[in-house]
Amino acid sequence: MADSPVIYDLIGGEQGLHALVDRFYALMDSAPEARRVRAVHIDGLDRANAKLFMFLSGWSGGPALYTEKYGHPRLRQRHLPFLIGTVERDEWLWCMSRALDESQIPPVTIEYLKGRFAEIADFMRNRQEE
């Protein structure tokens, strides 16, 4: 098990992770399919980009950058100030799915990540649907 590659390495390490996160936010910033989730980021995307990169670094088995700087991620708690419903979840997943599909990440890793991201994104919902 110790010789098994970690997700961080399969993503392409720091460079691959930066490429994934940068593409994810480029899609969020430009795609009409991400209009509502983009509106959640009223202060711009740079800070969110940096935080997602740091979080995913540690989450995927790389350097624990987010934890070192901000402490435990407490994802749901940190997202409570933002209204996240089904539409925002689905738009976030749309952006991540496209970014993954455009990446150089191995297909089996992409499918694994899509499943995990779907679970996490669903957990972030905090708004009752009408």
Image (cartoon, rainbow, N blue to C red):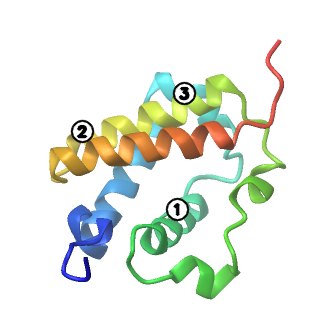
Please tell me how crowded label 1 is: few (under 14), some (14-19), or many (20+) other residues with Cα within 10 Å: some
Whichever of labels 1 and 3 marks the residue nearer the N terminus, that label is: 1
Say what amino acid the circle numbered 1 marks: Leu
Question: How far across and how far down the image is residue 25, in percent?
Answer: 45, 48
Query: In terms of image quadrants, where is residue 98?
Result: top left
Quadrant where the C terminus sits is top right
Q: Which residue is mark 1?
A: 52
Residue 71 in view of the camera: yes
Alpha-carbon distance for marks 2 and 3? 16 Å
* Outermost residue toward the front in this view: 1
Q: Residue at x 72, y 28 (%)?
A: 85
Q: Tell which circle, 2 or 1, labels the residue nearer the N-terminal end.
A: 1
Q: Amino acid at mark 3?
A: Asp
Which x, y percent locates residue 119? 54, 41
Q: Residue at x 15, y 51 (%)?
A: 106
- Is 12 on the left or on the right of 92, as rendered? left
Reply above or below: 11 against 121: below
For the residue labelled by badge 3, is the local secondary structure a helix, a strand or a loop? helix
Could you give the CA–CA distance between mark 2 and mark 1, rounded to whole angstroms? 18 Å
Residue 16 placement (x, y as % from top left): 25, 65
Q: Which residue is mark 3?
A: 90
Secondary structure under tag 2 reads helix
Question: Which residue bears the numbered disc 2?
Answer: 101
Q: Residues within 10 Å of mark 3 (few under 14, many from 20)?
A: some
Q: Residue at x 62, y 36 (%)?
A: 122
Asked if the residue at tag 3 contacts the one at tag 2, i.e. Cβ–Cβ closer than 8 Å, the answer is no
Q: Nearer the viewer, residue 97 or 60?
A: 60
